[in-house]
Amino acid sequence: MYKMNPPAVFAHESVMKNRKYRAGVERLVKALVEPRQIETYTDDQLPMLIKERQLLKNRVPMGTLSEVKDPILLFNTFRFKDEAAARARGKKLKDADIDVRGELLGLNAFNWSNYNLDGDPDRMHKVCRPCWRIHLQAGCLHRCMYCGLGGLLVSMVNVDEYCLHLKKLMDLHPWQKTYLLDDDADPPGLEPELGCLGELIEFFGTLKDRYLIIHTKTWNTDWLRNLKHNGNTIIVWSLSGPTQSRKIEPNAGTTEERIEAAHIAEEAGYPIRYKFKPIIPVRNWRREAAETIDLAFSKTHPDVISICCFMWMNVDEMKKRLAPVIDLLDPEFLKKAEENRGKAENPKTQPFPDDVRTEIYSHYLSEIRKHDKSIPVSLSTESWQMWTQFAKKMGMTATDYVCGCGPQAVPGLKKLECHPFTTAVRNDGGQIPCVTPPYKL
């Protein structure tokens, strides 16, 4: 597991009362740089932890902090049997002006994401796929400067019970083949000591035509070798060049370490993929992109690659988050981002204007094609307009591309076999009506 020195370790009473769950937490605490006492808490003590122990402090972009510490570790269980009581507790906290996320209440094991469907406020501005997302953690150890997932890392440990409920969800939604784990975390960081991720991987190994997807920046894959995964866990690495990986994502694996970790996983039989996401155009970004792609193909055989520029915020927010390293950015592209201030028609693709992102994507695609003419390459969470521009070059469209983590993106697939916006099923089991994309492709 990662070397870490958290300021505190908390475990809910439901964790400490279960021998199996407690043993995993105790193994992890024993492996810390400085072993900590495990502080047991109850639901009634949660407001005190938030207010007096500052549980939610420093959940802000890490590039804005003068000092970045390892997060507080908190271990909890999903309350499948008393979900109504947990939701009532959350409402009571909110009424007391304490807005607490579901993982602290034992909620949100699975959530329905209505991407690009009616009700999605961003459906006109980005392309993604409606799906169920699954969760075990919230928070991260990697300290990426642009990210606000520091300060607190919550891990849910009742994986045995979790898998029973997940199987029921899968049976209700046979259209979904792959399940992305943890949008808001990087699960390998606490393993194998915690013992949760391996249990989930082996659960998927017992299934037919259902796949777990782990999206990560980790170097930590040696422990995966002997798990009974049956090829049913896909590992997707967020890959960045040397400058970005070392200077902007300081606790993540370096470029070389991530590729070596992918090499180890591939040798152990796991399907592997890469996402160049988020691409931050540093000085010499073209050379670093080419060298990173060369190294990735020399060491591994990914079945899908996705690309995505740094987005989701305006230039002033980007400069605030990346303030300690802003001089590393390509000065021409930074100037264009500043000139684009307030002019972007699409709020999701800021801060870099379309011509900058087009240049970046064209370069990455060209370098990838030097190694593999047919590997699926997709734009990740990009705009409909950008897909219109790149569809012919990529040989895929916004409605049939295979991405790293989409709900039907099974290993070896070259194009989707069904329309992603008409085959999804609502969380009440009803069929979603045909949804016409805002741009015809």
Image: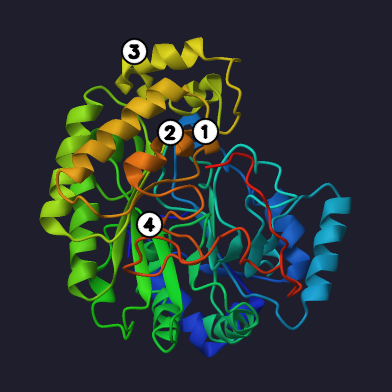
Label 3 vs 2, first from the N-terminus: 3
Q: Nearer the viewer, residue 429 or 103?
A: 429
Image spot of residue 429 (x, y percent): 73, 75
Q: Which dot, 4 or 3, sits closer to the camera?
A: 3
Q: What residue type is labelled 4?
A: Thr
Query: Can you identify the residue that label 4 sits on?
Result: 216
Q: Quadrant of the N terminus?
A: bottom left
Query: Can you identify the residue that label 2 sits on?
Result: 389
Mark sitting on residue 332: 3
Labels 1 & 2 near each other (Cβ < 8 A): yes
Q: Residues within 10 Å of mark 2 (few under 14, many from 20)?
A: few
Q: What residue type is labelled 2?
A: Gln
Task: Describe residue 113's horizontal placement relative to residue 227 as left or right.
Answer: right
Residue in view at x 87 percent, y 59 percent: 92
Give the distance between the C-alpha atoms of the residues marked 4 and 3, in whole angstroms.
30 Å
Q: Which dot, 3 or 1, sits closer to the camera?
A: 1
Q: Which dot, 4 or 1, sits closer to the camera?
A: 1
Label 4 vs 3, first from the N-terminus: 4
Q: Which amino acid does label 1 sit on?
A: Gln
Q: What is the count of numbered marks?
A: 4
Image spot of residue 65 (x, y percent): 49, 32
Q: In this view, does 415 lie above or below 166?
A: above
Give the residue furthest to the left: 298
Residue 325 occupies quadrant: top left
Labels 3 & 1 near each other (Cβ < 8 A): no
Label 4 vs 1, first from the N-terminus: 4
Q: Which amino acid does label 3 sit on?
A: Glu
Is residue 146 visible to us here?
no
Image spot of residue 404 (x, y percent): 40, 57
Query: Can you identify the residue that label 1 sits on?
Result: 385
Task: Describe residue 221's horizontal placement relative to residue 92 as left or right.
Answer: left
Q: Which dot, 3 or 2, sits closer to the camera?
A: 2
